[in-house]
């Protein structure tokens, strides 16, 4: 029970966290395409369950990540899940700490 995290800690955004000091850790997560945002076909893969996900390359990062700048090369048409992944959120900080 002591491992449980209080709800208020999970929903809190840490204002000190910024993507500019992160190597795009969240772009190594599996990203399912649940809406049509215009992601180019070359960055999409169909997984073994038949769902469309962002293709990840051998280095673990999403194929759409610019390896030099660590920025999203398709920012304007990025998937909904990427839009909703909040900088400074609990999930973000979990990825940064990994
Ligand atoms: S959202 Fe969080 S994990 Fe993702 S790049 Fe920004 S700081 Fe890193
Ligand atoms: S689409 Fe962009 S923001 Fe989403 S995982 Fe890929 S590089 Fe990161």
Image: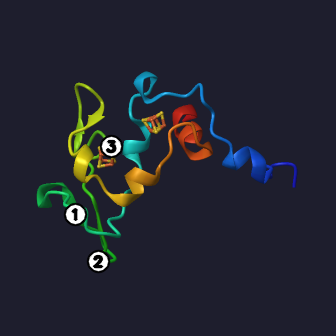
* Above/below status of 50 relative to 69: below
In the image, taking residue 72 as reference, residue 40 lies left or right, namely: left
Q: CA distance from mark 2 to mark 1?
A: 9 Å
> Residue 40 at x, y = what percent?
14, 57
Helix, strand or loop at mark 2: loop
- Rendered view: 48 above or below 12: below
Query: Which residue is under mark 2?
Result: 50
- Find out if the beta carbon at label 2 lies less than 8 Å from the nearest ligand 2 atom: no
At 41% from the left and 57% from the top, the residue drawn is: 81
Q: Which of the marked residues, 2 or 3, is nearer the chain's N terminus?
A: 2
Kindly give the residue lying farthest to the bottom in the view shown. 50
Query: Which residue does the image show at 29% across and 39% down from the upper left?
Result: 59
Q: Nearer the viewer, residue 21 or 48?
A: 21
Q: Secondary structure at mark 3?
A: loop
Distance Cα–Cα, label 2 vs label 3 = 21 Å
Is residue 57 at least partly visible in the picture? no
Place of residue 72 in the rendered image (x, y in percent of width and height, measured from the top left):
27, 39
- Per the rendering, the mark at residue 4 is none
Q: Residue at x 35, y 70 (%)?
A: 34
Residue holding disc 1: 45
- Residue 52 in percent (x, y) is at 28, 69
Does residue 64 appear left or right of residue 98 in this picture?
A: left
Question: Going from the N terminus, do you reach mark 2 or mark 1 first?
Answer: 1
Residue that numbered label 3 is attached to: 60
Task: State which quarter of the image contains the N terminus.
Answer: bottom right
Whole-angstrom CA distance, mark 1 to mark 3, is: 14 Å
Q: Quadrant of the C terminus?
A: top right
Q: Earlier in the sequence, mark 1 or mark 3?
A: 1
């Amino acid at each position: 029970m002591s491992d449980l995290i209080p709800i208020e800690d999970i929903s809190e955004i840490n204002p000190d966290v910024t993507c500019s000091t992160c190597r795009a850790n969240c772009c190594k997560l599996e990203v399912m395409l649940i809406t049509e945002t215009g992601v180019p076909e070359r960055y999409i893969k169909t997984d073994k369950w038949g769902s469309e996900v962002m293709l990840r390359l051998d280095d673990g990062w999403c194929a759409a990540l610019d390896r030099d700048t660590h920025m999203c090369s398709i920012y304007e048409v990025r998937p909904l899940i990427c839009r909703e992944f909040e900088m400074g959120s609990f999930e973000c900080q979990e990825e940064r700490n990994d």
